[in-house]
Image: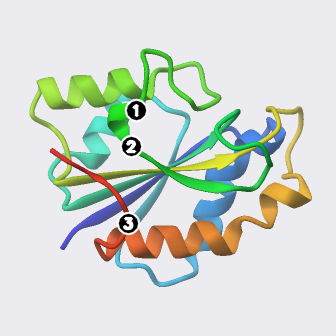
Amino acid sequence: MTAVVIALGDEFRGDDGVGPAMARVLDGCGLPARIVVSRGDPVELIDWWNGVHVAVILDAVTHVHPWPGSVRVIDPADLQTTAAGTHGFDLGAAIALGRALDRMPDRLVIVGIEITAPGRGPGLSAAVAAAAPEVSRTVVAAIAGEAPHSDR
């Protein structure tokens, strides 16, 4: 089985850096997955997830849950033309492009971590940093095939 965890975010925008911060936590867990950090280039995402068994995307989200630090698996089919994430790209469009090019993983899991708003400078708020154990459990479950996901 091949797996990749793609952590999205900008470490210099406060809580928006939750993806890279969680990637560092996961990197020391011995997961059977490649862990990469991205600012969200759609072509780069497609290259990383193409042909793998499972791809897990970690991203900061706003207004999905009422409290910062909550973790939710997001169905890719629920993504609108503008992504729930906090970046200047459309994750839904990247997924649509990957499907059109037949360059998708067998399973795709999107893990959203609620933040209040992107900030300035490095570092996470206490509430978002406290999400690390839940993010880790969710990623482990996703790789094991126990989390909700989207089949090709």
Q: Name the kind of residue labelled 3 in the image.
A: Ala
How many numbered marks, from 0 up? 3
- Around disc 1, counting alpha carbons within 10 Å, would you say few (fewer than 14), some (14 to 19), or many (20 or more)? few
Q: Is residue 97 visible?
A: yes
SS for tag 1? helix
Left/right of residue 102 with respect to residue 59 in the rendered view:
left
Residue type highlighted by circle 2: Asp
Question: Which of the two discs, 3 and 2, labels the residue nearer the N terminus?
Answer: 2
Identify the residue under disc 2: 75
Q: Is residue 55 above or below residue 61?
A: below
Residue toward you, 116 or 6: 116
Mark 1 and mark 3 in contact (Cβ < 8 Å)?
no
Above or below residue 40? Residue 6 is: below
Query: Could you tell me which residue is drawn at 57 percent across and 73 percent down?
Result: 136
- Residue 110 on image: x %, y %: 44, 48
Question: Which residue corresponds to the image point at 89% horizontal and 52% vertical from the top-left?
Answer: 125
How far apart in space, not on screen, are marks 3 and 2 (Cα)? 11 Å
Residue drawn where x is 47% and y is 84% of the image: 30
Q: How is the image coloured?
A: rainbow
Read off the residue under disc 3. Answer: 147
Task: Please name the residue shown 18% across and 73% down the image.
Answer: 1
How far is mark 2 from mark 1, CA to CA? 5 Å
Q: Which mark is residue 78?
A: 1
Question: Where is residue 80 drawn, in percent x and y?
Answer: 43, 21
CB atoms at circles 2 and 1 under 8 Å apart? yes
Q: Farthest top residue?
A: 81
User: To which quarter of the image does residue 33 belong?
Assistant: bottom left
Q: Secondary structure at mark 2?
A: loop
Point out residue 46 in the picture as x, y percentages from the top left corner. 28, 36
Question: Percent from the top left, x then y, of residue 58?
Answer: 53, 51
Tell me if mark 3 has few (under 14), some (14-19) or many (20+) residues whose alpha carbon lies within 10 angstroms of its own. Answer: some
